[in-house]
Image (cartoon, helix red, strand yellow):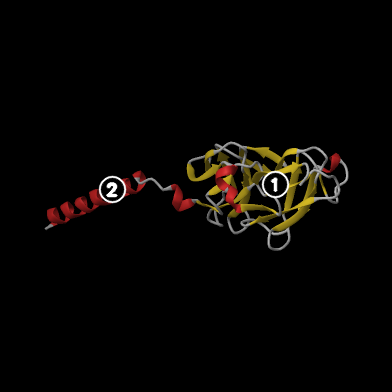
Amino acid sequence: MKARLLRTVGIVSVLLSVISCDKENTAISSDSVLTFKVSDNILPADGKSSVILEAGIDPESTIRTIKFVTTLGTFMNNGIIKRDTTASVLSDGTVKLRLYAGKTAGVATVQAKINDEKYTVSQDIRLISTTEYYPQESLSVSLSDTAIAATPAQTFCQITSILKEGPALSEMTFQTTSGSFLGTIGDSGKTIVLSTDLNGKATVRLLSSIEAGTVFLTIHCDHSTVDTTIRFIVGK
């Protein structure tokens, strides 16, 4: 009976030893100690757009800083622009900061790290070209005439442009190679900047010049650009 009891105790001791070893050899996943999320996974590579990054740890942890690293774009922390930065967590264990897009398209792999980089989690953010992100069809342009008489300050074409997708009260720029926009001062009247209304609409009048020919017009608003033409003709 005593020998059987000793064998049983020995077996239990071995099992406990194996369980203890298994626990020691089991790696703690980074996701279990560090959370990381982003407000958006797609950004235009326009040099100014940004997303909000939020990382978090156990509020009771003795670790009070989180390091961030990115392959594209930059962080701004305390006025310093870098591709890596360290931020202090709040009392709830979280920290937020912004990643600003550069002008290079590609995939930005953003990492959050703690404990001398022992634990690392990452998020991928696509930075895409502005022409892909802002479709040109979001800006429509219509002309009241396709040709007007080449008589300055007497005939005009009304240009109406509507930003279909974008913020209201945006700045819309009109440019012409000939003639002048009504209400402009300087630059020979060839450029005017207007604010769109709440419907994204802006209207301007282009006065003709005495020079007959094809006039090239460019309208730009919120990353979208439309090029069109009008003709100044003699004797119309």
Residue occupying image coordinates x 28% and y 48%: 17
SS for tag 1? strand
**Secondary structure of the residue carrying numbered label 2:** helix
198 to 213, vertically: above or below: below
Q: Position of residue 54 (x, y in %)?
A: 57, 53
Q: Which residue is mark 2?
A: 17
Tell me residue 206's x, y (percent): 78, 49
Position of 176 with respect to 103 (left or right) is: right
Which residue was labeled with disc 1? 219
- Residue 211, by quadrant, is top right
* Residue drawn at (78%, 39%) of the image: 178
Question: Furthest residue to the left?
Answer: 1
Q: Position of residue 229 (x, y in %)?
A: 68, 43
Q: Residue furthest front?
A: 235
> Which amino acid does the dot numbered 2 rest on?
Ser
- The reply to whether residue 88 is in sight is no
Instruction: Out of 65 and 71, give the one closest to the viewer.
Output: 71
| Label drawn at residue 51 | none
**Total numbered badges shown on the rendered structure:** 2
Residue 197 position by quadrant: bottom right
Q: Position of residue 28 (x, y in %)?
A: 41, 48
